[in-house]
Image: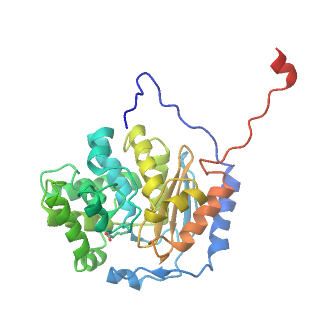
Amino acid sequence: MELDFEGVAQRVSTGLLPGWDAVEEHVAAAHSRNRSAGSGEVADYIPILAEADPELFGVCVAEVDGAVHSAGDADVEFSIQSISKAFVYALVCEEFGHEVVRDRVGVNNTGLAFNSVVALELNEGHPMNPMVNAGAIATTALMPGRTADDRWAAVITGLSRFAGRPLELDDVVYRSETATNHRNRAIAGLLESYGRIDVDPLEIVDVYTRQCALLVTARDLAVMGATLADGGVNPVTGEQVVSAEVCRDTLAVMASTGLYERSGEWLFEIGLPGKSGVAGGIVTIAPGKAGIGVFSPRLDSAGNSVRGQRATAYLSRALGLNVFASGPHPRRSTSEEAR
Ligand SMILES: NC(=O)CC[C@H](N)C(=O)O
């Protein structure tokens, strides 16, 4: 797409959340209304994830002014899994800029499952977007560093800055996925065969597997999301983690591909950029307003948390976050128009 933005400033969207008490009340309601929603299955293709307590359920909203509201198991740790893809993508965008990342990794939905090999083959090895495994592995391969260890260090440091605290690896999850990630190794091998990565495929899958095994809480996800909602400034630590342009680009990709082949449905119901992970987390961003972090391990067939989707949908509606929702602008009075 050839576009011309020369001399056109990016205007910032405005709008406020309701007051502190109302947000607090709605976060509690998002939890209580969905606490007994029982459908979905805990992921088991990574063996250790099958052991998660399916009843865990946490909801958290972090506002861009630093206020944090939570309900339920918002401080229980779980592995970040695919949610990491959005934040690693932001770090790589910060490093290389809009065009390079758009051309190398892509921004279009595959319409296929997150771990699809067919999607790669159908697109001549182009990874398509950073939120599916192929694009995420290609993105992790762009992280700065000479060795796999350097890249891993850059991932853990970068994601910790988004969370505002030092994140740690869940070694058990990492080892469980390493023993079973043959499909991701196949994807990385294909990426190499198509000349789409310049690093050792097995080494980069290892960094990617570690990145997915970082431990976070729903609260961390809310703060990480709020950083993307706040022009790249972590609202709790005050640190500028990435630029505002990078946030805009990352959120656009999340909106179109963050929930894989269910992204259209997500946008239709919730109207916000989000990213899910198979451990049961979802991060959602209301630009200029807040980040939402939810966690509950039971998933739908696309790998998205059932209670998490329900709680986020409630919050989007109740807090007025859907970016497509508008009301009629107050009309000018006839006397004003006559002037
Ligand atoms: N959807 C996910 O969360 C998938 C992440 C997982 N680590 C994988 O690569 O399969």
Where residue 70 sits: x, y (%)? 58, 63
Please name whichever residue, 22 or 282, is drawn nearer the observer in this view of the structure: 282
In the image shown, does 237 or 120 lie closer to the viewer?
120
**Residue 60, visible in the rendered structure:** yes
Identify the residue shown where x is 56% and y is 37%: 13
- Residue occupying image coordinates x 31% and y 72%: 170
Quadrant (top left/top right/bottom left/bottom right) for the N terminus: top left
Q: Is residue 129 above or below residue 94?
A: below
Task: Give coordinates of residue 79: x percent, y percent.
Answer: 37, 70
Residue 246 lies left or right of residue 152; in this view the side is right
Report whether 150 appears left or right of 298: left
Q: How many marks?
A: 0
| Percent coordinates x, y for residue 266 in the rendering | 54, 61
Question: Residue 185 at what x, y percent from top left?
Answer: 20, 70
Q: Is residue 122 left or right of residue 221?
A: left
Image colouring: rainbow
Give the vertical position of 285 relative to 337 (above or below). Answer: below
Please name the residue shown 46% across and 25% down the image: 8
Q: Is residue 224 visible?
A: no
Q: Residue furthest top?
A: 339
Query: Would residue 32 appear left or right of 238 to someone viewing this image?
Result: right
Vertical position of residue 107 compared to residue 214: above or below: above
